[in-house]
Image: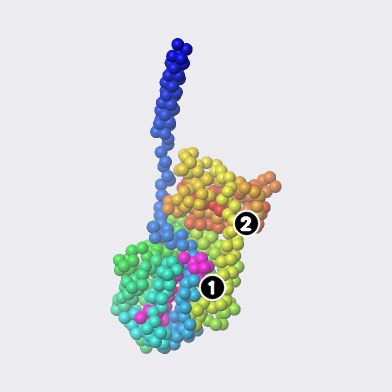
Amino acid sequence: MEHIHKVEVLKIHLRILGAIKFLVLCFLILSCSKKKEVIAPAALLPVPSTAQLEWHEMEMNAFIHFTINTFTDKEWGYGDESPSLFNPSQLNVDQWVTTLKAAGFKGIILTTKHHDGFCLWPSQFTEHSIKKSPYKEGKGDIVREVSEACKKHNLKFGIYVSPWDRNRSDYGTPPYVNYYRNQLKELFTAYGPVFEMWFDGANGGDGYYGGAKEKRRINGASYYDWPATLQMVRELEPDVIFFSDAGPGVRWVGNERGIAGETNWNSITPDTLFAGKAGIEKLLETGHEKGTHWIPAEVDVSIRPGWFYHAKEDTLVKSAEKLFDIYLTSVGRGSTLLLNVPPDKRGLFHENDVKVLKAWRALLDQEFKTNLAKNAKVEATSYRDENVVFSPLNISDENKETYWTTDDDVTTASLELELEDAATVKYVELQEYIKLGQRVQAFTVEVWKNNAWTKVADATTIGYKRILKFDPVNTEKVKINITASKACPVISSVKVY
Ligand code: FUL
């Protein structure tokens, strides 16, 4: 009897347990269905294309200026130089590419033709090329060598093809534009993939021009009919990034000193700009907050005073410290650095340049060795919809697709990072999630010192990446205050060194 009673009690217990389980399940289903919808901020136009985004992520590319000028000790060849002068004795493109790769460059842009018109590939459209030089008895092709070495070492390959040609007798007339296009066709058909194409702004002036030896002026806005030329190239290489003073892929930064504007918007309104247009330097340096197109600045600068190799500049190679400063004013201001390293007459990077590149790499690695934000406790004044998808923790998860953001009507906000231990800090590095556009207009950095917040830096734009350097300070807490933003800030990464 007793036994039967126990079984009944057990049954009742089981039923109660089942009911509880059912209720818990209902509650879970109900609360899940009630869960807020995840609504990311709308993109703030303009935004980068996929190819531009990849270009931003490269951060550092190298320029290689090498041509007949290397042998004539000039910066701009007149166009009458004999191809027989081009004779590198120990050319080794592997030395170029491996040196640059070790320094951290992701792509290389080679001067396939500079203003003097000499071609580093055996173009079928001119005799003014490497095929008439002693190099490999006229069988050489340095464009091919470099593009293949880039493939081998997994770097991207880009080309500089000067529109201005001081050798051609037809420069300034319509047939030359056809010649130029034929050369582009040759290059883009046989040497790709090409990630970036450089159109230089220097256009027209005096030159040899097939013996005419005169000054020729062209109308930079109309002579080349750029839209048609770009369209032709795009058909061969759809994702190529076009560099010129005003884009359309990336713009010139307005100076050759390695300095992007402290305020650096990735946007400009290009309608009234064209390669070679005078007086636009300042605008190119800062971009324009209300610009209609995403056309970021590229910072081109040479490791030496000149773009081409000159023995007299062997002692004037920029120091590792100078290159570090340039890194901060280019990559550290949301631009991509394009650092020129010119091979010498042997066809090698000079020992002094190689030494400096190594020291610079070591300096970068040393200064940015330990990211103190990695294990920091992070809090924000608010986060979007109080949804963990937009949590401030995203800034240190090393996932470039996650970010911290606020509600649409919140354009000022702070992030506080509490470091694991007190440490000496001297750099803060921030990244906006630029897929949704560039937003931040002003921000400050504070550190906790003597029981109070002390401002150590303030700045304007962030963009793809912003690095601020300040006097080293010992602290356990760092605060970022976004003080003005075009729309809710969207920050994907914060690092502290
Ligand atoms: C300038 C050119 O005139 C220089 O020679 C060099 O190629 C530099 C990168 O661009 O406009």
Q: Nearer the viewer, residue 305 or 143?
A: 143
Residue at the far top in the pictured view: 1
Q: Which mark is residue 303?
A: 1
| Element type at mark 1 | loop
Identify residue type, mark 2.
Answer: Lys
Query: Residues in magenta?
Result: 99-122
Q: Is residue 100 left or right of residue 274?
A: right
For this orientation, the residue located farthest to the right is: 450
Does the rendering let one see residue 57? yes
Q: Is residue 121 above or below residue 388?
A: below
Q: Quadrant of the N terminus?
A: top left
- When asked about the image quadrant of residue 208, the answer is bottom left
Residue 98 magenta-highlighted:
no
**Residue 483: where, in percent of width, then height?**
54, 48
* Residue 27, disc: none
> 49 or 367, which lies in front?
367
Task: Determine if the magenta segment contains residue 111.
Answer: yes
Q: Which residue is mark 2?
A: 426
What type is the residue that disc 1 sits on?
Answer: Ile
Visible in this render: residue 75? Answer: no
Q: Is residue 75 above or below residue 234?
A: below
Which residue is depicted at the point 36% across and 72% down? 191
- The answer to whether residue 474 is above or below residue 247 is above
Q: Residue at x 53, y 69 (%)?
A: 257
Q: Give how far across and how far down residue 151 sits, in percent.
A: 41, 69
Q: What colouring style does the render use?
A: rainbow
Q: Residues within 10 Å of mark 1 (few under 14, many from 20)?
A: many
Q: Position of residue 50 (x, y in %)?
A: 39, 57
Question: Element type at marker 2?
Answer: strand
**Which of 433/136 is in front?**
136
